[in-house]
Amino acid sequence: MAKVLVVTSGKGGVGKTTTTATLGAALAQRGQRVVLVDFDVGLRNLDLVLGAERRVVFDFINVIQGVAKLSQAVIRDKRVDTLALLPASQTRDKDALTEEGVARVIGDLRRMCDWVICDSPAGIERGAILAMRHADAAIIVTNPEISSVRDSDRIIGLLDAKTVKAEKGERIEKHLLIARYDAARASRGEMLNVQDIMEILSIPLLGIIPESDEILRASNLGCPVTLSDPASLTARAYSDAARRLNGEEVEMLVPSDKKGLMGKLFGRRAA
Amino acid sequence: MNSVAHARQPMRFRGRSFIAFALTPEPPIANWLAELDNWRRNSPGFFAGRPLVLDLSAVTLSSHAIAHLLQELTAREIGILGIEGVEPSQLEPGMPPLLKGGRATNADEPDAPPRRRPAAEAPRPETTSLLLDDPVRSGQSVIFLGGDVTVIGSIGSGAEVVAGGSIHVYGAIRGRAMAGASGNPRARIFCRKAEPELLAIDGYYRTSEDIDNSLLGRPIQARLEGNDMKITALD
């Protein structure tokens, strides 16, 4: 039975889709079976970031409507055979997602793999709520600036209220992923630093992904950075995060403002 | 056959939500029923007139076992208006309806039995307090007029806590804290780090702009003196 993860943030443009694709690829590269689900109906991006946009025939909405079977809609990655994608519809919008449909599809996906990773749309409305509804754990992607942090706080509150787990009185695991961290700007006080963010959000830290050009290149090439450039700092940060998700204790490295050097963060336990 | 035609009256059918108490039996049921009997002995009449829901999420019971449990509760004059925490297939026709979407909510402390005192005695107000173990997240609104509120954590920006009594925050106040909301000018606000959007006591408020810069980021106490809010540092 798979673990269902939701990658969410509240704020748009912080790196949810990139994180879903890259973390998913990192987990799949370790041999685990991963299915990525795009919940951003009408504004789908996960297929682009994975380079699968020319192979989309059926999508999530088609499966909910019963027009296609799950096996027809799920697209296997050509580079890592344990990685697959259930794309969103581009022609419909989030109202086409139904509670029962989503519950049924997630239930079916649970039986097929080790990880179901749901890429949430931005916002706090129907699409975001449905993406988090069946999650066992959440990754909250935050950029080190104040509006992203406040929106993340909001989404954490919703995770504790609107998920099936929360309604049953159980705790949903929450992991913080700081993306687009710019050490130079943080040390100049132009951006929040890691301690500030953790103090405000009070959830365990899964990883710190540095701001880099590699991510943009990877998106444009349609290849997650852990596949295209595994030695890069960004790829290593995502690989470490994947290891922590599997329960491994990996030392947290904070990107320093010296190019190529990593400072150590003492006493920081993995999530 | 005679039939009388009447004008059709519109039927009003609306959603309403109410607060009910949930009884949550835990296995073994026989022991739980014994505990229930204990409670009834110590607080007679407690269950009379209270809206009660049966939460069966902590036990696995067959339809037969559920029917038996309901009989046991009826024998104890405990009326159940709905059942939650089961699959629809476990309920039979004639049983109370299946309820979904129950949420934990503030209600009167169930420890105190309902007051049935003679009218001559002035009723003493029940002061209770609310303890929150988690931070209050942005967008959340905690309203507790029954007494003090203590937060083990912070009040996030865009969140608010409204208390009838004082507010104690073992963390930062980054949102709104409104104490003494039931008309209590002696209520106070305490926190470890003051970065509030707004502080209010008994309706008298101060926004962040009007708080002295030297106090921001420090542990503070806020109290009313007349209609002036005095904020002092605690370090």
Image (cartoon, coloured by chain):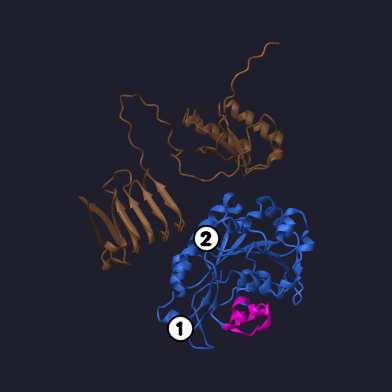
Residue at figure coordinates x 75%, y 59% from the top left: A111
Tell me which corner region of the image, top left, top right, bottom left or bottom right, holds residue B193: bottom left
Whether residue A6 appears in magenta in the rendering, the answer is: no
Residue B22, percent across and down?
54, 39
Tell me which segment is drawn in magenta.
Answer: A213-238
Residue A237, percent across and down?
59, 78
Left or right of residue A30, residue B179 in this image: left
Res. A38 visible in picture: yes
- Which label was assigned to residue A155? 2
Q: Residue furthest top?
A: B1
**Badge 1 amino acid:** Ala
- Going from N to C along the chain, the mark reached first, 2 or 1, is 2
Residue B52, percent across and down?
54, 34
**Badge 2 amino acid:** Ile
Identify by letter the chain in blue. Answer: A
Whether residue A221 appears in magenta in the rendering, the answer is: yes
Q: Which residue is mark 1?
A: A184
User: Crowdedness of circle 1 by 10 Å Cα count: few (<14), some, many (20+)?
Assistant: some
Residue at figure coordinates x 32%, y 34% from the top left: B124
* Image quadrant where one finds the N terminus of chain B: top right
Tell me the CA gap for discs 2 and 1: 28 Å
Tell me which corner region of the image, top left, top right, bottom left or bottom right, holds residue A37: bottom right
* Image quadrant where one finds the C terminus of chain B: bottom left
Check disc 1 and report its element: helix, strand or loop: helix
Visual hue assigned to chain B: brown
* A228, B114: nearer the viewer: A228
